[in-house]
Image (spheres, grey):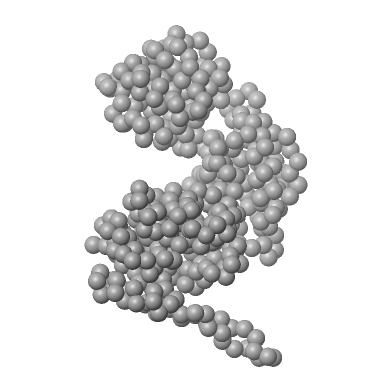
Amino acid sequence: MTSGKWLSLIGIGEDGSLSSAARHLLSTANVIYGGARHFELIGPVSGEQRTWPSPFSAVYDHLKALRGQKVAILATGDPQWFGIGSTLARHFPASEMRVLPSLSAFQLAASRLGWAVQDCDCISLHGRPVETLKTVLYPGARILALTSNSETPARVADILTDAGYGPSRMTVLEHMGGDAERIVEGSAEGWREDVADFHTLAIELKPLAGARFLHQTPGLADDAFHHDGKMTKREIRAVTLAALQPHPGATLWDIGAGCGSVGIEWLRASPRGKAIGLEPHDERRQMADLNALELGVPQFDVRNTAAPDGLDGLPAPDAIFIGGGLTTDGLVQTCHKALKSGGRLVANAVTLEGEAVLQQAWQEFGGELTRLSVHRASAVGGLTGWRPLMPVTQWSFVKP
């Protein structure tokens, strides 16, 4: 065994099967952490058995106090795939850990259904809002989801039915690989099944004719959001997100978040991304929170504060959008200083005062200054004509 690796993370299947290496680690461990179900599966061991503390976050300090002893942690399936492994990696270096994964729930479910894992959206609803599912709803999608308990499928069925995906096929795969394995199937709109707490959920999405499709490409329709009319409109929003360049794991500061349309679309287009919105108006902040939940990104962090004071202590941004407070003295300069190399800064203005700030920023820092004008067709008497939206001046900048 590699020296220095005192902390072993062992994946275990429903049948309790373990490799010889995993058995050796368990037999020599001084302390073993796991759930009651895990200890039932592995049988007798000589090491001290500890179940997870409450709150769970206390376990990291407990483990640090054991550093240097032989410690094993039992996890279900592959602990590196929506499991404890990713969290442990934030507290302990890889040089101190040894990971022995078992088959993941996603692999087992795909094998039962004959699905190709690479063609599935694999998500976790375990300990997360079920509304997270809404980011992967599209016609023909195949979704494999980890769940929290027996109530999750019914809640998922309600979400699918409300979103126009009632005909979708839902499959609950219970205790895969164990003696109690069972498969339960049904449609979302007709779901009435009682299922076990420990299961994986598979979904084949089928929409009703005319069902609304909320795409992940930036530029959702304005009426997809609750708003008071003061929001970044669809066409401008799409151009703004293109300039912000969301990508997986990136962090956005959304200054003057309003109803949250830009921050929400950033998160829908940026898997594992973060967005922090600053919005001092209570009504708009409440709308942003509601929109984030309904559009599947409840992790949108909307704060009751304004820039520049509210920027103190925030994680370094990969991109900043200034949609409000642009005329605050020194705001652009503060944001420019906060950006890391390669970071993007985008600001929109609809007033002459805001335009003056953007022109000064363009002259000071460079970048691109663009005038965006949108006209929408609407009725003019019995005919049709063009009605303009307010023109928007946009400054976009990439920090060298």
Q: Position of residue 26 (x, y in %)?
A: 42, 16
Q: Is residue 242 visible?
A: no
Decide: is 131 above or below 107: below
Location of residue 327 by image quarter:
bottom left
**In the rendered image of this protein, does residue 41 appear above or below residue 289?**
above
The structure residue drawn at horizontal position 48% and vertical position 61%, both measured from the top left corner, is 257
Q: Quadrant of the N terminus?
A: top left
State the residue in front, 388 or 328: 328
- Asked whether the viewer can see residue 280, the reply is yes
Q: Quadrant of residue 164?
A: bottom right
Image position, residue 358 (x, y; %): 34, 73
Specify the farthest residue to the bottom: 382
312 sits left or right of 258 in the view: left
The residue at the point 58 percent across, 44 percent down is: 129
Residue found at x 36% / y 35%: 90
* 68 relative to 295, above or below: above
Q: How many marks?
A: 0
165 relative to 216 in the view: left or right: right
Instruction: List x then y, in percent, for residue 30.
Output: 39, 12
Name the residue at 37% across, 55% down: 309
Task: Tell me where residue 250 appears, x and y as whole percent.
Answer: 38, 53
Q: Assign the C terminus to one quadrant of the image.
A: bottom left
Q: Looking at the picture, does residue 51 appear above or below residue 84?
A: above
